[in-house]
Image (cartoon, coloured by chain):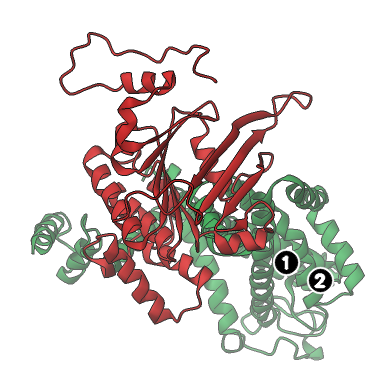
Chain colours: A green, B red
Amino acid sequence: MRKTGMRKTGMRKTGTSTASKPAGWRAWRAWLLDDSPGSRGQADAGRAYRLTAALLRNPLAVVGALIVLGLVLTAAFAPWIAPASPIGQDLSNRLMPPSSAHWMGTDELGRNIFSRVVHGARITLTIVALVAVISAPLGLIIGAVSGYFGSWVDRVLMGLTDMFLSLPKLILALAFVAALGPGIENAIIAIAITAWPPYARIARAETLTFRQAEFISAMRLLGATHTRIIIRHVLPLCTSSLIVRATLDMAGIILTAAGLGFLGLGAQPPLPEWGAMISRGRAFILDQWWVATMPGIAIIVVSLGFCLLGDGLRDVLDPKHDDA
Amino acid sequence: MMREMPDGATDDLLRVQNLVVSFPGATRAAERIEVVRGLSFTLARERLGIVGESGSGKSMTGRAILRLIRAPGRVAATRLQFDGIDLLALPERGMRKLRGARLSMIMQDPTFSLHPIMSVGRQIGESLSLHESLSRRERKQRVRAMLEAVRIDDPDRVAKLYPHEISGGMGQRVMIAMMLIARPDLLIADEPTSALDVSVQASVLQLIDDLVTERGMGLVLISHDLSLVARFCDRILVMHRGQVVETCIASELHRARHPYTQALLAAVPRLHETRDTLPVLERDDRMST
């Protein structure tokens, strides 16, 4: 009873300040921003609303979010967006400059570059998602085990991590692809193998802060095994900082994937991978600039989008950064 | 209520003889520092209080019994027997089976001893799922019953709360529920009330006392509060610098003979105080014998 009363007065207050907005929205907003939420659902919704609002106040983050959203939508609806088949050749229309018929021109086999860039979004998104799905949990587990057990386990695992960190990412990925054989699956595996060390470092640092904590001791004296403690009690506490870091890393993953494609070790022709497309266009860069430039622009825009979004997320989710 | 058991009963729950807990010294060459030095006692299904000042080795004794002292700490004893089982010879796997199920420990501060992002109900259930295979429904019922046993009024609501949403006293009740749900035989309570305020202390202790008597468990109550231990225990062990300096029946604490115990007792303020200054512990050679 008391709570509903408070909600009503809160509504009236915000009502006077935002008189131009429709009444329904005002009620919603008041409900979301209520200082004493009546249910857990309301509290969660309120928090989500506040986070989104904070993110929206940062214009760069909005740009990033829009780019990432655009990438996802493009990848999802590629066959409907693309005007032509990404691999359909039309040799009578080779190397046509951008025009109303071919928005980004055509390449040396007469394929529509716009269609290829649109379909390339699928490949890029697949690589990014799979690498994140493989490397983040891998790093998480290695870091948590290392931090939890300490002593020689820590030394061995962190030594391994340091070895991976000491080599440049692209070079290491190149070596792995060279060993595994070119192809998109192997490129994903190679990038994932090179991407886990930073996550392991983060997870270890987080684990160290609470490995001596009382609640871990409490679980030990209840008779829980180490495996159980790590999986059920340590890992959930490390994930939040890892998610932000993974978003920030996406741009790097895209660039590495494009780099491998450019060197002919990633996706194989005729797959419309952006890096591979630049590599093919290199031969005509002086006379037919659009062949290499268009996929290049796509790479820049998408990695910029992930960077901006990751930056924005970090600022919003970091409680120490709370100046909004 | 079984208040007193005859001394030297054969069905001792816990026998500790010459327990030594040591840590490495500051340098590699330095001798190991012994924080518990040759402690011996036996415990039947009774309530034993261990008192002593900070750093006297009380908590280390509790942890050593559960073998929860992490390297580089080391535990040694001529005998460390729980219900006929030699704890020191037991492999880690066997030890895990005992912990929580038959031997349990309540920790000092509930705000640090509960997992921050796990709901209270799930945490209490953890102990059950470790030692008993129950269906989800049965487990929920047991958790509910346990929460009621620790006198939480609204068990269904509380089970869904997270540790930061409950008060200290409630947190300690949850901790007790978590440690007692698997029905252990021996409960070690390591300063269970030092993080709570006075009014809550009494009710939490009363709760532990009731549960212990009701289930016929053995209790080791570790505390620095002499009067509190005297009120809730049958026997008292006074520790000083890692050794037991005096053992006495709780009701006869005021007749303690050891100078250290006497000094401790003298340092407790009385209600109608006539002394101008409270005596501070004067350390002399007689104490460390």
**Seen in the image, is A116 located left or right of residue A285?**
left
Question: In this view of the protein, which residue sits in the foreground, A309 or B103?
Answer: B103
Q: Amino acid at mark 2?
A: Gly
Q: Which residue is mark 2?
A: A281
Can you say whether A15 is above or below B29 in the image?
below
Q: CA distance from mark 1 to mark 2?
A: 8 Å
Q: Chain ID for label 1?
A: A
Q: Is the residue B103 above or below the residue B227 in the image?
A: below
> Do the residues indicated by labels 1 and 2 lie within the same chain of the protein?
yes
Name the residue nearer the viewer: B212 or A42: B212
**B133 and B268: which one is in front?**
B268
Answer whether labels 1 and 2 touch (C-beta < 8 Å). yes
Classify residue A281 as left or right of residue B70: right
Specify the quadrant of the image occupied by residue A71: bottom right
Residue B270 higher or lower than B45, as above or below: above
Q: How many numbered tags mark residues here?
A: 2
Residue A316 seen anywhere in this rendered image of the structure: no
Secondary structure beneath disc 2? helix
A310 with respect to A119 (left or right): left
Residue B60 visible at all: yes
Q: Which mark is residue A293?
A: 1
Q: Chain of mark 2?
A: A
Q: Dot 2: few (<14), some (14–19), or many (≥20) neighbours within 10 Å?
A: many
Provide the secondary structure element on which disc 1 rests: helix
Position in image of residue A216 (x %, y %) = 53, 52
Q: Quadrant of residue A323?
A: top left
Residue farthest along the right direction in this orientation: A179
Place of residue A302 in the rendered image (x, y in percent of width and height, measured from the top left): 61, 65
Q: Residue at x 53, y 78 (%)?
A: A73
